[in-house]
Image: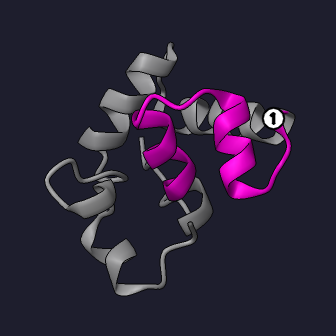
Amino acid sequence: MDVQEIDDEERAMLYLFMCDLRDHEIASRLFISVRTVQRRLDRLMTIADAQTRFGLGARATKLGWIDPDSPGGLTQTATARRPFY
C-alpha cells in the first residue's frame, strides 16, 4: 500500500495528539473545531491503516510522519518548512 504524505497541519495535530492532548485541547491550540480534529484524526487512521488511536501513533512513527528523536516530533522535511503550530 502506497501511503501518502501528510501536510504540516496534520503533522502538528499528530504531534499534539501524541503529547496526550485531548481533542478539545488540540482544537483550541490549532484554532479549529473539535469535530475537525476528530474527522482529521479518523482520516489519518484510515490512511495509516490503524485500528485505534494508539495504533495511529505507532504507525505515524513507523511511516515517518513523526520523528520521536527530533524536537517537536517533526520529520526532517517538516522542519525545513515553517511549522504550522
Q: Is residue 71 above or below residue 82?
A: above
Residue drawn where x is 57% and y is 48% of the image: 13
Magenta includes 13? yes
**Secondary structure found at label 1:** helix
Residue drawn where x is 58% and y is 54% of the image: 10
Residue 29 locus on image (x, y percent) = 66, 52
Which residue has dot 1 on it?
34
Magenta includes 71? no
Depth check: give the residue in front, 54 or 33. 33
Drawn side of residue 19 relative to residue 29, left or right: left
Drawn side of residue 76 relative to residue 25, left or right: left
- Point out the residue furthest to the left here: 69
Crowd band around label 1 with a 10 angstrom C-alpha radius: few (<14), some (14–19), many (20+): some
Residue 22 locus on image (x, y percent) = 61, 27
Quadrant occupied by the N terminus: top left
Q: Is residue 78 above or below residue 2?
A: below
Residue drawn where x is 52% and y is 56% of the image: 12
- Point out the residue furthest to the top here: 52
Residue drawn where x is 19% and y is 61% of the image: 70
Drawn side of residue 85 relative to residue 58, left or right: right
Residue 36 locus on image (x, y percent) = 81, 41
Amino acid type shown at disc 1 = Val
- Magenta part mainly helix, strand or loop? helix
The magenta-colored residue range is 11-34
Quadrant occupied by the C terminus: bottom right
Report the colour scheme.
one colour
Q: Is residue 22 above or below residue 62?
A: above
Depth check: give the residue in front, 26 or 47. 26
Q: Is residue 30 above or below residue 25?
A: below
Residue 52 locus on image (x, y percent) = 50, 14
